[in-house]
Image: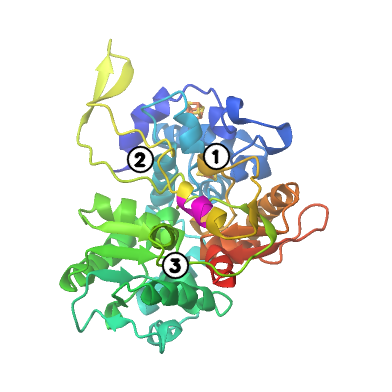
């Protein structure tokens, strides 16, 4: 699609500004009622999904151009999708998130690439990773000695896909190893992609680099099919979303599971049992790409239709991704199964979760916005009285680590796999 394809949506947005808030019947306090980090930080309507629809239209009518200011607005979206699910509370036919990403693609096509985006995309092109400075040759060092099969040499039905962040970040690789060990010990016969292992490129798509994403996805799909893989299991929420939604849109039909879903299954089957108490009060952060953006893909082909020659709609109706069917229960069931763990919820949870601040490449392109976004979540986590913030995404985990909230308080940040390990 091109920006011109979104013009009916740009014209149909009703300026209700519901995209700036979690739905009013879910708001528990004004302090935690907002949902979009970009508008909350930028404090100017252009940063909201509504403002982005206005900007998209203005770029097409010639009332705006890709200036330094408008480009900054476009690049400051974390692609977290909070506006998208909020809009769909009352609307079924607008796709604010797809539009935000198309605006980014429009800017990129016009040569407006942020220097930090360039570094990331150079790393993807040269070393097949989203993490600048890391080498393809070291990609599988995290898995040494685990006994995972090399699916580039032998066939296998279950692929364990660690993703870039878990593969390279020394603070996180132990969690990927622990997750793989848990599954192997429970009897899951699985492997990695060996020499063919590379970035899922989901982050490239979040930043608007659609062609680069498609090229990487094609290479991954080829390797996955050649290995005979039937199930992909990943501990990374970004990879989960990429395979489950974006690769499915390219035609990959395969079971995709996040590690928390597999752990929930193994706990229910008593293949993982707990022997120790973990006396902790914790709160759980729903990662955007596992939660509201983790819904299954629904194919759609249809066309725009005008009613009374002015009201835009689509025939048949487009599938409605409202975030309700993301992965929310599995991590909570895992936490509830751990003896001694008490789960206390934040105000913005499930499809109305607040972004960690790492999405859409903003951690690199907009470090102040990203850090403020993370601090807001730490403040919300601390307000529950929990002693630790648990999550199921390496990007969230690394974004939150060490961040102080506005009162100067940090919180212990844990991978859900760490808690499982503590109770074995
Ligand atoms: S994007 Fe949706 S929620 Fe936001 S102003 Fe437009 S119609 Fe309302
Ligand atoms: S995707 Fe997230 S950051 Fe971007 S406009 Fe929507 S709510 Fe704001």
Circle 3 is placed at which residue position? 272
Determine the residue positioned at 40% across, 25% down: 11
Q: Quadrant of the C terminus?
A: bottom right
Residue 4 lies, with reference to residue 216, above or below; the image says: above
Q: In which quarter of the image is the N terminus?
A: top left
* SS for callout 3: loop
Q: Foreground: 190 or 6?
A: 190
Question: What span is colored magenta in the figure?
Answer: 330-334
* SS for callout 2: helix
Circle 1 is placed at which residue position? 352
Q: Measured from the top left, where is residue 288 in percent x and y?
A: 50, 50
Disc 1 or 3, which lies upstream in sequence? Answer: 3
Residue 309 falls left or right of residue 102:
left
Residue 205 falls left or right of residue 249:
right
Within-10-Å neighbours for mark 1: few <14, some 14–19, many 20+? many
Residue 90 falls left or right of residue 39:
left
* SS for callout 1: helix
Disc 1 or 2, which lies upstream in sequence? Answer: 2
Q: Are marks 1 and 3 in contact (CB under 8 Å)?
A: no
Q: Is residue 101 visible?
A: yes
Residue 244 falls left or right of residue 250:
right
Disc 3 or 2, which lies upstream in sequence? Answer: 2
Within-10-Å neighbours for mark 2: few <14, some 14–19, many 20+? some
Circle 2 is placed at which residue position? 3
Determine the residue positioned at 29% across, 77% down: 193
How much space separates mark 1 and mark 2, taking CA atoms? Answer: 27 Å
Q: Can residue 52 be seen in this view?
A: no
How much space separates mark 1 and mark 3, taking CA atoms? Answer: 31 Å
């Amino acid at each position: 699609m091109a920006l011109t394809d979104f013009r009916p949506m740009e014209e149909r947005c009703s300026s209700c500004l519901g995209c700036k808030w979690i739905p009013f019947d879910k708001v528990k306090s004004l302090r935690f009622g907002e949902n979009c980090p970009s508008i909350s930080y930028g404090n100017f309507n252009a940063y909201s999904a509504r403002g982005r629809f206005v900007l998209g239209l203005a770029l097409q009518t010639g009332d705006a151009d890709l200036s330094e200011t408008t480009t900054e607005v476009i690049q400051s979206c974390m692609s977290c999708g909070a506006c998208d699910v909020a809009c769909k509370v009352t609307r079924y036919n607008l796709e604010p998130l797809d539009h935000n990403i198309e605006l980014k693609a429009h800017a990129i096509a016009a040569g407006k690439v942020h220097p930090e985006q360039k570094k990331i995309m150079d790393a993807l092109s040269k070393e097949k990773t989203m993490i600048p400075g890391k080498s393809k040759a070291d990609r599988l060092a995290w898995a040494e000695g685990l006994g995972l099969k090399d699916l580039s040499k032998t066939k296998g039905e279950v692929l364990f896909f660690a993703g870039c962040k878990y593969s390279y970040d020394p603070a996180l690789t132990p969690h990927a190893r622990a997750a793989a060990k848990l599954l192997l010990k429970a009897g899951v016969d699985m492997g990695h992609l060996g020499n063919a292992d590379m970035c899922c490129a989901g982050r490239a798509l979040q930043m608007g680099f659609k062609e680069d994403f498609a090229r990487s996805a094609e290479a991954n799909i080829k390797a996955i099919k050649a290995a005979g893989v039937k199930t992909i299991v990943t501990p990374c929420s970004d990879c989960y979303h990429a395979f489950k939604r974006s690769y499915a849109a390219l035609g990959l039909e395969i079971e995709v599971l996040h590690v928390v879903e597999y752990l929930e299954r193994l706990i229910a089957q008593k293949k993982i049992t707990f022997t120790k108490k973990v006396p902790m009060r914790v709160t759980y952060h729903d990662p955007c790409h596992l939660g509201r953006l983790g819904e299954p893909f629904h194919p759609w082909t249809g066309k725009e239709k005008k009613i009374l020659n002015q009201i835009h709609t689509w025939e048949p109706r487009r599938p409605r991704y409202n975030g309700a069917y993301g992965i929310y229960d599995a991590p909570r069931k895992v936490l509830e199964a751990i003896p001694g763990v008490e789960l206390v919820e934040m105000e913005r949870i499930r499809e109305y979760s607040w972004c960690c601040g790492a999405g859409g490449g903003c951690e690199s392109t907009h470090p102040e916005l990203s850090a403020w976004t993370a601090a807001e979540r730490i403040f919300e986590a601390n307000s529950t009285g929990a002693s630790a913030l648990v999550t199921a995404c390496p990007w969230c985990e690394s974004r939150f680590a060490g961040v102080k909230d506005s009162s100067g308080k940090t919180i212990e940040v844990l991978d859900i796999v760490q808690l499982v390990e503590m109770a074995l």
